[in-house]
Image: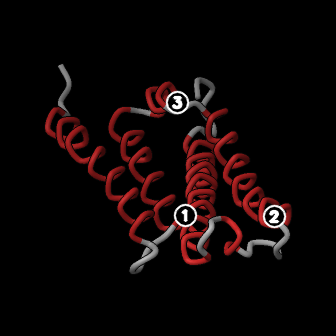
Amino acid sequence: MDDRLILRVGAKILIPYILLFALYVQFHGDYGPGGGFQAGVIFAAGFVLYALVYGLKNTQRVMPIRVTYICAAVGVLLYAGVGYLTLALGAAYLDYNVLSYDPEHGQHYGILLVELGVLITVFGVILGLFYAFAGRGRADA
């Protein structure tokens, strides 16, 4: 029988709230402290907690290593893609004003997309680094 029942139940309760808080930090970054970097670290911390409680192999079943690499690349592509989209629309690189009929809405959309790219990249890199260090020296990881 497992002797860490309270820890496992506590983690099952906390992890969804940690991930939800990361999304709050992401979307609240326009109006206060927070943004993509902080949200990415918090989102990765939820998976690190899962790995510490349930084990590295179980975490890699939930979030495979390959997905973390893909997240790191897709986030950078999203960030750069927003910049190239603004260039294609005739503005300067990352000039968000052209992303909507109203420059204020364009700024809002641009910041949200760029910050989402940062979140995805930071999440992928942090979790990839955790996997690299946690699995070091293990033949089964």
Closer to the camera in the image, 137 or 76:
76
Quarter in which the N terminus is drawn = top left
Of the image marks 1 and 3, the number of the one nearer the N terminus: 3
**Mark 1 vs 2, N-terminal side:** 2
What numbered label is drawn on residue 89? 2
Q: Quadrant of the C terminus?
A: top right
Amino acid marked by disc 3: Gln
Q: Is residue 86 above or below residue 33?
A: above
Gap between marks 1 and 2 measured at Cα:
18 Å
The location of residue 103, given as percent across then percent down, is 62, 76
Q: Amino acid at mark 1?
A: Leu
Judging depth in this view, the residue of 96 and 42 nearest the camera is 96
* Camera-side mark, 1 or 3: 1
Q: Which mark is nearer the camera, 3 or 2?
A: 2
Residue beneath label 1, please?
Answer: 112
Q: Residues within 10 Å of mark 2 (few under 14, many from 20)?
A: few
Q: Position of residue 30 (x, y in %)?
A: 46, 75
Q: Which residue is mark 3?
A: 60
Residue at x-position 14% and y-position 38%: 6
Marks 1 & 2, CB-CB < 8 Å contact: no
